[in-house]
Image (cartoon, rainbow, N blue to C red):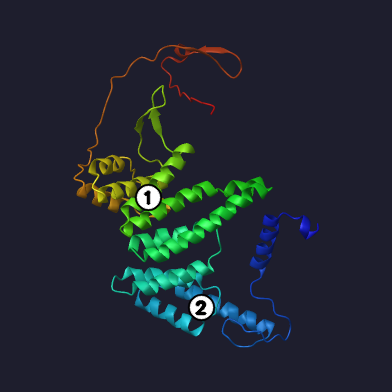
Amino acid sequence: MAMQNVPRCLAFRLLCLGMALLPFPCLTAGDSSSVPGGKPASTHAALEEWRVLKSEVGEIVAMPAGPEQIDRCRAFLKKHPDFQDIYPLLNVLVADCLAVPENDRAYAVQLLERMSALSNRGYGLENLLLVDRFYLPYHLSPESALRLLAMSRKEIEEVRRLVPLESDAGIRSQMVPEWSEFHLLVDEGRVLLQAGDASGALAKLLEVERKRDDGGASIQLRDAQGKILKTFPGWDPLSNWMNLAMAQAYAALGKLDAARERLARVGGEGGVLGAIEGPKEDLATHLKVVARTAREIRGDPLVAPDFDLEDLDGKHVRLSDYKDKIVLLMIWATW
């Protein structure tokens, strides 16, 4: 098949696959191109040096977290600044540095921006995960976090453009720009909130709520006229963080009743976005919300009404036919 007849997204995937299969940059016999250690070498020597350095990175990553691991990471980066497969090492170095409050946060941000530059783009999600894991829990630079999120927004828009061009239904089902956009808006709201912009944060979070409601992502009880009678607590981590951030924004703006109402919608699951229980409890304490105690409600057993149904063989059976036997009812519905 001529390449000009291959859809651009598929051609790009084939190119990426070809690059991924190469263990090291292609070198012809006798080539003296630069290698990870910065020394000219033959193809065999270059590949062998890459394997040695890759093994050393794996050894450092497997070390117990602490000062020794930090020293080994920094020494490797200083000695091999151009080594490409450095993402795992940067990841543990950032985690180690942030584990000690006295360490330089600006240095951690530099490492994170380098990780962002090295990451393989995953439908716009990789920068979101860096923000979730590091920027938000450790209150790192909002300016840097928003830069990473701006890159995610561009990637998500590119995915949105490519979805109609993708002929493989399996791949297309994994390309869900709407979900990534929900995640992005929640993260943008949380970053703005940490930066002190409660109004801007609330605007972002209300935007994502409108989009999620339009997409049927929230659980609501409505009357016959469509009026919302009750919105139930979040069933997924993203809606939990959205509601918690909205509660925090309302509290910062002095709208305490709205903050309490939003807090009541937060479930207990934080997922990959982080642990939610701590900030949820902190806000509940600030708002003087009394935790609800569990209640046990029991009812007296009642005799089930008799009924007649047709089984899979077309035979009519009654519940009373199974008197004194255990009956398992499986209720199915089509949606």
Q: At label 1, which amino acid type do we have?
A: Gly
The quarter of the displayed image where residue 311 is located: top right
Residue at image position (64%, 82%) is 46
Q: Are marks 2 and 1 in contact (CB under 8 Å)?
A: no
Q: Position of residue 207 (x, y in %)?
A: 42, 45
**Can residue 166 be seen from the camera position used here?**
no
Q: Which of marks 2 and 1 is in front?
A: 1
Badge 2 or badge 1: first in the primary sequence: 2
Query: Which residue is label 2 attached to?
Result: 56
Q: In this view, does 103 lie to the left or right of 45?
A: left
- Please state the total of marks drawn on the protein image: 2
The quarter of the displayed image where residue 143 is located: bottom left
Residue at image position (43%, 11%) is 306
Q: At label 2, which amino acid type do we have?
A: Glu
Q: In this view, does 4 lie to the left or right of 76?
A: right
Q: In which quarter of the image is the N terminus?
A: bottom right
Q: In this view, does 121 lie to the left or right of 278?
A: right
Q: Is mark 2 on a helix, strand or loop?
A: helix
Residue at image position (64%, 72%) is 23
Judge whether 216 appears above or below 172 on screen: above
Closest to the observer, 249 or 6: 249
Judge whether 87 appears above or below 262 on screen: below
**Can residue 180 be seen from the camera position used here?**
yes
Q: In 3D space, how far apart are the residues under numbered discs 2 and 1 (Cα atoms)?
A: 35 Å
Packing grade of label 2 (10 A; few <14, some 14-19, many >=20) is: some
Closest to the observer, 262 or 98: 262
Residue at image position (66%, 62%) is 17
Q: What element carries label 1?
A: loop
Packing grade of label 1 (10 A; few <14, some 14-19, many >=20) is: some
Query: Which residue is label 1 attached to?
Result: 270
